[in-house]
Image (cartoon, rainbow, N blue to C red):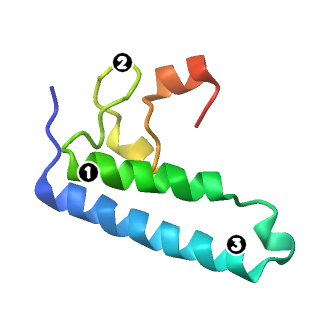
Amino acid sequence: MMAFTPQFIEEMRQSLDRRRASKERILQSGGEQALSHSYKDIRRIDYALKRITEGQYGLCTQCGQPIKTDRLFLIPETPFCTDCAKSVGSH
C-alpha cells in the first residue's frame, strides 16, 4: 500500500484549512456565490481533517485503497477513490 509522505499530508491539511476558511467566508457573506456552496462542504472538509488526525487520510473510506494523489490535489476532501466515487454517485 502506498504511504503518503508527511510533507504531502501537511500540504493537504493546509489546503483543506484554506478551503474551509474560504467556504465559511462565502457562506457568511451570502449572495449569489453562496448558492453554489453549502455547510455540507464544510462537514466534508472537517471529516477529511479528522482522517488526517487519525492517520487515515488518502485511503478510500469505501474500499480502503489509496486515493490517487492527483485526485486529492483536485478534491482534497474526497473520501473516495475514483471507482468508489462513481459507484456511490459522489465526487
- Residue that carries the numbered disc 3 in the rendered image: 27
Left or right of 1? Residue 70 is right
Q: Position of residue 14 (x, y in %)?
A: 33, 69
Labels 1 and 2: the sequence-earlier one = 1
Determine whether label 1 and label 3 are within 8 Å by CB.
no
Q: Is residue 91 above or below residue 48?
A: above
Dot 3 falls on a residue whose secondary structure is: helix
What's the distance in space between the residues labelled 2 and 3, CA to CA? Answer: 33 Å
Q: Amino acid at mark 1?
A: Ile
Residue at x 16% of width, y 32% of height: 2
- Residue that carries the numbered disc 1 in the rendered image: 52
**Residue nearest the observer in this picture, 14 or 71:** 14
Residue at x 35% of width, y 36% of height: 68
Left or right of 26? Residue 24 is left
Dot 2 falls on a residue whose secondary structure is: loop
Determine whether label 2 and label 3 are within 8 Å by CB.
no
Q: Position of residue 52 (x, y in %)?
A: 26, 51
Q: Quadrant of the N terminus?
A: top left
Q: Amino acid at mark 2?
A: Cys
Labels 2 and 3: the sequence-earlier one = 3
Q: Judge depth for marks 2 and 3 and give the one in front.
A: 3
Left or right of 30? Residue 6 is left
- Residue that carries the numbered disc 2 in the rendered image: 63
